[in-house]
């Protein structure tokens, strides 16, 4: 029984050494605390910007919020998901780029379709008045 246990322990140690050889970082307490503090800061600042009415133009506020959101996505990917360009030989970064391209295509196509539906399907003021006269 002890021979099986020692073989299992050696296999587990070999697996750990194998994982470290590929440069996989499972994070540290300091890394998680840093990520958490950055996430809190990147949430509190936009909250203050909106609630304090810091910008007079709402479009400026939206652009700043989008910038903070993009930075927070990067913070979460680096500190919590441990995504780097060297992770898994670059395949996770390639999968991320593919996902971002699909999301951009889907969102921009949806906005484009909704805009054109709104433009083409809304009745014109002239036809709306003439429709009331129809028996």
Image: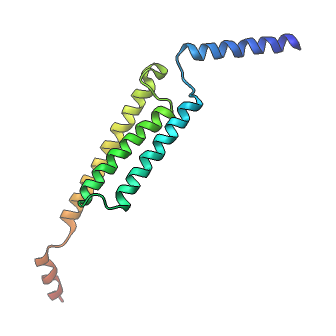
x%, y% of residue 61?
A: 29, 55
x%, y% of residue 34?
A: 50, 35
Q: Is residue 55 above or below residue 90?
A: below
Furthest-left residue in this view: 126
Nearer the observer, 75 or 40: 40
Q: Quadrant of residue 49?
A: bottom left
Q: Which part of the image, by quadrant, shows the N terminus?
A: top right
x%, y% of residue 11?
A: 71, 13
Count numbered badges in the picture.
0
Residue at position x 36%, y 42% in the image: 70
Nearer the observer, 43 or 70: 43
Q: Is residue 42 above or below residue 89?
A: below
In screen coordinates, is 87 left or right of 54?
right
In screen coordinates, is 100 left or right of 14?
left
Residue at position x 64%, y 17% in the image: 16
Furthest-right residue in this view: 1
x%, y% of residue 99?
A: 39, 37
Q: Which part of the image, by quadrant, shows the C terminus?
A: bottom left
Coloured how? rainbow
Nearer the observer, 134 or 10: 10
Nearer the observer, 106 or 3: 3
Q: Is residue 93 above or below residue 99?
A: above
């Amino acid at each position: 029984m002890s021979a099986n246990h020692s073989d299992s322990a050696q296999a587990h140690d070999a697996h750990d050494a194998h994982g470290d050889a590929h440069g996989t970082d499972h994070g540290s307490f300091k890394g998680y605390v840093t990520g958490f503090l950055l996430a809190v800061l990147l949430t509190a600042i936009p909250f203050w910007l909106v609630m304090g009415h810091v910008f007079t133009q709402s479009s400026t506020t939206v652009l700043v919020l989008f910038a903070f959101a993009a930075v927070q996505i990067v913070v979460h990917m680096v500190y919590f998901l441990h995504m780097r360009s060297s992770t898994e030989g670059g395949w996770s970064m390639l999968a991320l780029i593919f996902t971002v391209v699909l999301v951009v295509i889907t969102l921009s196509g949806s906005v484009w379709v909704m805009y054109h539906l709104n433009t083409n399907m809304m009745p014109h003021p002239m036809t709306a008045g003439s429709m009331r006269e129809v028996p």
